[in-house]
Amino acid sequence: MTGTGVGPKLIEINGVEAGYDKSVVLHDVNFHVHEDQFTGIVGPSGAGKTTLLRLLLGTVKPYSGTVTNMQGLRTAYVPQLETVNWNFPLTVSECVLMSRPTKRKLPWSTQPERDEVTAVLERLGIAQLADRHIRDLSGGQQQRMFLARALLRQPQLLLLDEPTSGVDVSTRHDILHLLADLHEDGVAIVLTTHDLNGMAAHLPHIVCINHRVIAEGTPKQVITPPVLEQTFGARMEVLEHLGMRVVVDEQPEHKGSVSN
Amino acid sequence: METILEPLQYAFFQKGLLVASLSGALLGFIGVYIVLRGMSYIGHGLSHSIFGGFAAAQLFAAQFYILGAGLWGIASALAINTVAKKSRVGADAAIGVITTASFALGVALFAKFGTSGPSFESALFGSILGITTEQIIGLLAVIVLTVGFVFLRYRALLFATFDPDVADVSGVKVNRIEAMLMIILSLAILATLTVVGVTLVAAMLVIPAVVARMLTDSFGKMLAISTIIGTFSGFTGMYISYYAGVPSGTMIVLVGATIFLLVLAITGGRGLKRSVGLDAH
């Protein structure tokens, strides 16, 4: 999997300080998103992961520094599942359709619009759930529905906030493979996660943050005890398993740990 | 049949019946958005706030009191919207203070100076008496504005109601839509205030929408059912009010509450499950 970011820049964040209500959450952040990027933003709770995502989205404005978007950039956003009311009276297809850009002034959808929704639901393997109420979906299906809603916008950049939070292992694998497929299809992806082993270690590019960027690079470059200690404020051990980095709480008796 | 036809010979009742039915329809329709956005408390507060404007405007510009109360209502609506969005802590408290202070001002002005328009009791609990043609025209204008707004901005309004954060980054002008919704809400409250009464308007914003949610999982159907329940409550409540000799607003709300209990009994756990956490965001 490529995705470490060498293509044209979609967004440039330079020397940014940002936060909420005058309190600074992120200091001196420099971060670029490229056309072929697939990046995980990793850090503990409250480290500023979502704030960085919101800077990319443009919903948080920097106190200082600059955020520059490529002209005409199409961005789509997948929020955390718990941010919406799942009891809202809405079917899966209605939920997906609402994001479709339209200049149409009539409330009801056209046949081409419905065909588009069906196509994107088929792509994500949930076409058979189109008429279900959104509450009747599993966590993984809800995540797929949000992805479908985002893809209907035909984004160049897809931003996801904790996409594997609260889902089981099998669903996590599904989501990871789905995102890898989308990336293969040419969509740049940036997501936040606090799941080092289940998510971050599988991504081609990671940014570790704790109110500032601690390190960025491939998992091999970034998932190291010193970087993790700086990021999470706790000592962790890093093991190698089938060529992948595995993070465990520090236990002195472990052998074969990676020291760099 | 005579029970239905007999009151219709009076012009005041014809007007009252028309205004009550249209008021129920309007509040039922807009109430869907208010309930789903978790703004029930704001609707309650806003109706009390408008009462202050209603009293003050009658005092200072008797001929234009509707205009004055409307401006007061819109200003209150936008202020409440701003407080609710910006203040992370104590938004409910701030809204409570603003709106109840405005209500208290209204009560004080009514007590001290009286009124040239609807009586104090009518303004609080609604009345079928004294409804003017101008009020009917005003109500129709608000209905046209509301339906037009929802019709033309249906998808954006739905997106902003369900998921405002994502709607915002998807190009929906969420702030503008929310401000417009608050303005329409304040105008709807003002236009229905004389029949339903300031203290009971909030109930008619909430009850039809909650009942409709208990009956359907579809947003479009919820809008239609809520409007029908609101209309029925207004129509039936007005008749009962005529025969029972009690303020119209109380009967309209009681009819709505009876429908709620009936639907709850019929749908049982399924309906309750649908309506629980209706406004949870």
Image (spheres, grey):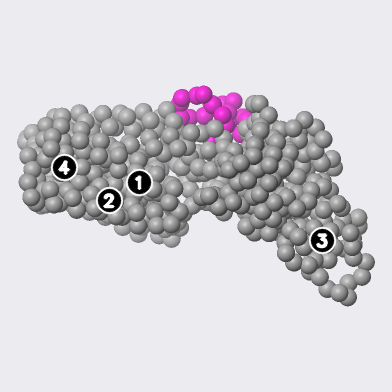
The amino acid sitting under disc 2 is Thr
Amino acid type of the residue tagged 3 in the rendering: Pro
Dot 3 alpha-carbon crowd within 10 angstroms: few under 14, some 14 to 19, many 20 or more: some
Q: Are marks 2 and 3 on the same chain?
A: no
- Gap in Å between the C-alphas at discs 2 and 3? 56 Å
Q: Which comes before the other along the chain, label 2 or label 1?
A: 1
- Residue closest to the eye, B108 or A163: B108
In the image, which disc is placed on residue B99?
2
Tell me whether the residue at label 1 lies in contact with that at label 3, contact meaning CB atoms closer than 8 angstroms. Answer: no
Q: Give the residues in magenta.
A: A95-121
Numbered label attached to residue B56: 4
For label 3, the residue is: A226
Earlier-in-chain disc, 4 versus 2: 4
Q: Is residue B67 magenta?
A: no
Q: Are marks 2 and 1 on the same chain?
A: yes
**Residue at far bottom of view:** A253
Residue that numbered label 1 is attached to: B80
CB of mark 2 within 8 Å of CB of mark 1?
yes
Q: What's the residue at 90%, 62% (across, down)?
A: A258
